[in-house]
Image (spheres, coloured by chain):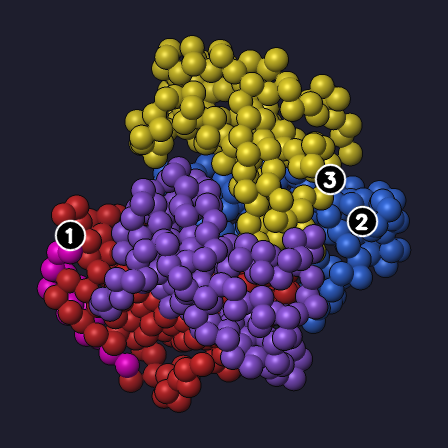
Chain colours: A blue, B red, C purple, D yellow
């Protein structure tokens, strides 16, 4: 198993932070939050980040810029309990031409419970497309602290 | 389509109220919150209600009293948007011997978006079992206002 | 609790039938298929029915005709087990001007485990819209047997 | 983005194979199968593999051996369409003392759409516990071809 970099385990590292509710529907037969549900909570933190960074709270589902997931890696460190909320932190780790990489960490009871690294790419019919310059500029504000 | 009783559309009718986050994962290809996701949000409001009423926040997944859903009816009144939260209200409509009925309503932007009536029954191997008297007493505090 | 009409409990009543896989993700902390997951399986049976009835298997997500759920009622009769599949039956109970009503029943191990009645309405910006005549004609072929 | 090993993209490499239905509920607002839903489909393939390998189809939810996810990595190669099924392949890549690693690949229309590598660990209260020898022996039969 991979030993994560201790710096990744600190909430203060992540410039974007959001509290997310867990649901009974996230709990599986092992009576903890299921790992796929944790993946959905991480997805939610990326969306909330994107809404803030893009500033388009009014239409987050607008498909003017179509960003799809190319790669994700999760490290699960502790079991996550229901009905307690989690806090997710998001940072922009890398900004490429048509893609970017986000670092995310999830916390419950002030302990890091999971890490997630995601590579996103702007994808239109025909292939990848350069990110708009305004998005890249917006992302720069979310570099890890 | 059923015309709902206007009294059911008022949040103030419901003694238990909880704010619930919507998720990107709740959105379907019609770009609104999917009706099954609304069912999950209603389930969540019932669980949060039960945790408060039973006072067992420490172990809501304890199966000492096994309550299963016997019947649910949903009326969808308005489309529900992401990423805005909803508020769900819960009231105890009927307390039987081994079963009870909850009324729930969901609100977004101060408008009622959906109604849900649920019949729950205490079910153990072999069939239904009387509700504990403490649970019935607790439920009495949540009669509609 | 409502006593369902015995005629509804027979698979042979339903002209459209589909076998659906259950998933570990459908199982909740009570170690049975969760009632919201059953709602999703019923939704799936309606979609598979619609794909067959509309004959547009190539683009079931096309929004040319926007059908939304107005009302659903579930009766849960037996616990549903994982990893066994279920069979869902669908019939058209009523065809209105801009809406229609489907009857659905779910079976596992040859026993009816749940019933679902759904009112769907064609909804566009501005309100409900008449169903296309071809859709109504297609629906006629799925009256209960 | 990581360039995957071409050998991983061949279904014939994977000794366990299972066809899995997609659901309308897996589709997100981009009108493809959501990446979290793909994670759930991969989870399902691991469960189906485990049921076959352990031979305990009668009680896959038995918690006698508690296996939790420690690490997962996904590579998304192509968009996945609804309502078409996918085929998932599973192989045992590594068998450790208290953990093991599975390789999974997903196919639709005979093309590899996603890869998934998962590290699972046997976890009880107090920490990780050695895998039973019978499980290790069973896993040996699922080495990549």
- Residue D16 rendering spot, x and y as whole percentages: 53, 22
**Rounded to the nearest whole Å, what is the CA distance between mark 2 and mark 3?**
13 Å
Q: Is residue B120 above or below residue D129?
A: below
Q: Secondary structure at mark 2?
A: strand
- Residue A69 rendering spot, x and y as whole percentages: 70, 44
**Rounded to the nearest whole Å, what is the CA distance between mark 2 and mark 1?**
54 Å
Eye-nearest disc, 2 or 3: 3
Q: Is residue A10 magenta?
A: no
Crowd band around label 3 with a 10 angstrom C-alpha radius: few (<14), some (14–19), many (20+): few
Compared across the picture, whether D129 is left or right of C129 comes to: left
The numbered disc on residue D78 is 3
Q: Chain of mark 2?
A: A
Q: Residue at x 72, y 32 (%)?
A: D111
Q: Are marks 3 and 1 in contact (CB under 8 Å)?
A: no
Name the one closer to the observer, B111 or C131: C131
The numbered disc on residue B127 is 1
Q: Is residue B136 above or below residue B112?
A: above
User: Image quadrant of residue B33?
Assistant: bottom right
Q: Residue at x 29, y 71 (%)?
A: B102
Q: Secondary structure at mark 3?
A: loop
> Which residue matches tag 2?
A122
Eye-nearest disc, 2 or 1: 1
Q: Are marks 2 and 1 on the same chain?
A: no
Compared across the picture, whether C116 is left or right of A102 comes to: left
Report the magenta residues as a range: B127-144
Name the one closer to the observer, D81 or A107: D81
**Rounded to the nearest whole Å, what is the CA distance between mark 3 and mark 1?**
48 Å
Q: Residue at x 74, y 64 (%)?
A: A62
Q: Quadrant of the C terminus of chain B?
A: bottom left
Q: Are marks 2 and 3 in contact (CB under 8 Å)?
A: no
């Amino acid at each position: 198993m991979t030993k994560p970099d201790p710096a990744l385990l600190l909430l203060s590292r992540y410039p974007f932070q959001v509290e997310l509710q867990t649901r009974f529907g996230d709990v599986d037969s092992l009576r903890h939050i299921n790992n796929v549900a944790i993946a959905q909570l991480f997805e939610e933190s990326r969306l909330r980040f994107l809404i803030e960074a893009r500033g388009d709270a009014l239409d987050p589902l607008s498909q003017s810029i179509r960003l799809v997931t190319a790669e994700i890696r999760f490290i699960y460190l502790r079991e996550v309990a229901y009905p307690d909320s989690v806090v997710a932190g998001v940072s922009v780790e890398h900004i490429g031409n048509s893609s970017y990489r986000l670092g995310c960490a999830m916390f419950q009871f002030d302990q890091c419970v999971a890490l997630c690294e995601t590579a996103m790419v702007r994808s239109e019919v025909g292939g990848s497309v350069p990110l708009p310059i305004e998005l890249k500029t917006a992302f720069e504000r979310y570099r890890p602290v």
